[in-house]
Amino acid sequence: MNYTSIIYEKKEHTAFVILNRPDKLNALDNHLLNELKDVFTVIAHDDEIYTVIITGKDERSFAAGADINELNQLNVLSGKKITELGQTVFNQIENLGKPVIAAINGYALGGGCELALACHIRVASENAVFGQPEINLGTIPAYGGTQRLAKLINCGRALEYILTGDCIPAQEAYRIGLVNKLCNPEDVLTEAEKIANKIVSKGQVAVKMSLKAVLSGFNLPPNEGQHVEASLFAVCCGTEDFKEGTSAFLEKRQPVFKNK
Ligand code: COA
């Protein structure tokens, strides 16, 4: 597929997905969502890709939300369709089975904030601005934001931001745990790459099992979550990487993982 609203690049084992509608602050229209759906399907099937970084073209914006021109034309039926598409794509990102890092410059509003929330790790510039301003448009976040925001920063805080539509400046987003790391605008991509490279250097079976344990356990009662954790730990115990990792420690050397 030839992409027009995103740019897709690969550097060694990391894929870069760049939102590319800078004149519209990377607003997520139907076309862009479908391109994301396609590219994350490609990434899911590419065994050479271990991590993904998603970012916005230019420093002004990660994504300023769903495209309000399209929202303005929605009715009940088409509204249901677009929310299902947005949810499907963002679930696809969350359940990719490979770590996805959001490198956030500028605006991450509405659907842009929800996209960041669907990623596993968020690195943001000190000029980033988060928020769920849908209330100002007479609607609600509907690409998974009501659920993910409440889980990440707690229910009361999420309700405050969703009900007031207030922006969340980067420092505040960091303080409440909405972002993992803050840095200068020019360093956002480099910092995201540093995290990606660190993950790439690990045994990829353990990376996948870590993601699975945390994400699938998240919605389960603690005892069921621990059951999942135990099963995935047992899987790791059967891998060559586990033998290598533990042996390397005992032999006081660096491990060489084979991802099996
Ligand atoms: N959907 C469609 N177009 C959008 C958009 C969105 N979510 N956000 C920005 N744009 C467009 C603007 O219409 C403008 O296009 P134009 O030049 O053709 O008029 C362009 O992007 C630049 O935006 P502009 O508003 O001129 O920039 P600004 O610096 O003055 O303000 C924002 C930036 C982010 C504060 C402002 O654009 C905004 O509030 N956007 C909507 C945010 C929102 O409500 N998102 C949730 C949607 S569910």
Image (cartoon, rainbow, N blue to C red):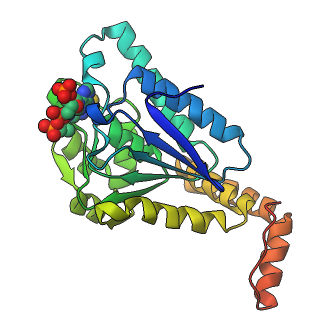
- Residue 34's spot in the image, x, y percent? 50, 24
Q: Is residue 1 left or right of residue 241?
A: left
The front one of 108 and 4 is 4
Q: Is residue 124 left or right of residue 166?
A: right
Q: Is residue 140 visible?
A: no
Residue 69, relative to residue 92: is it above or below?
above
Residue 23, relative to residue 171: is it above or below?
above
The front one of 143 and 230 is 143
- Residue 50's spot in the image, x, y percent? 66, 54
**Residue at the (56%, 26%) spot, across then down:** 2
Count of marks overlaid on the render: 0
- Residue 99's spot in the image, x, y percent? 57, 53
**Residue at the (32%, 28%) spot, across then down:** 66
Ligand 1 - quadrant of the structure image: top left
- Residue 116's spot in the image, x, y percent? 40, 46
Residue 251, relative to residue 137: is it above or below?
below
Which quadrant is home to the N terminus? top right
Which quadrant is home to the C terminus? bottom right
**Residue at the (71%, 62%) spot, across then down:** 206
Q: Is residue 20 visible?
A: yes
